[in-house]
Amino acid sequence: MAEEDPDRIAGHFRALAAFHGERGGVTPRVLVDGRDAVVLGDIRQTVQATGRPYTARCALHLTVDHRVITRYHFYEDSLTVLPAFTG
């Protein structure tokens, strides 16, 4: 796995935060197996450009090696999110 630039990763999360207004969510389940974890839940956000809110089911797969996150894969229900961007 290629090592990523920490500034580039931080910039990605800053851009996501700027793109959305209100944010929140619910994490009903966390599953851990060794160095891997899966977080299942709902995200609630508002698209800044349209002002439209959305709620979507999501899953996050994390891998942690020596206290460092080495994998961060995020999956969301794109069809639920689409109307908030397009109206």
Image (cartoon, rainbow, N blue to C red):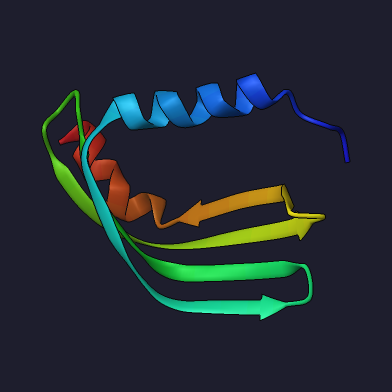
Tell me the quarter of the picture where residue 15 sits: top left
The quarter in which the N terminus is drawn is top right
Extreme residue in the left direction: 51
Residue depicted at 21% across the width and 50% down the height:
54
Instruction: Tell me if 84 is positioned left or right of 79 in this view.
Output: left
22 in relation to 35, above or below: above
Residue 38: image x %, image y %?
60, 69
Instruction: Tell me if 83 is positioned left or right of 4 in this view.
Output: left
The quarter in which the C terminus is drawn is top left
Tell me the quarter of the picture where residue 48 sits: top left
Extreme residue in the right direction: 1
The total of numbered circles placed on residues is 0
Q: Is residue 45 visible?
A: no
33 in relation to 6, above or below: below
Residue depicted at 19% across the width and 23% down the height:
49
Residue 47: image x %, image y %?
22, 34
Residue 14: image x %, image y %?
43, 26
Tell me the quarter of the picture where residue 53 sits: top left
46 in relation to 19, above or below: below
35 in relation to 79, above or below: below
Extreme residue in the front direction: 67
Q: Is residue 75 visible?
A: yes
Residue depicted at 30% across the width and 48% down the height:
81
Q: Nearest the camera: 7 or 42?
A: 7
Instruction: Tell me if 43 is positioned left or right of 63 in this view.
Output: left
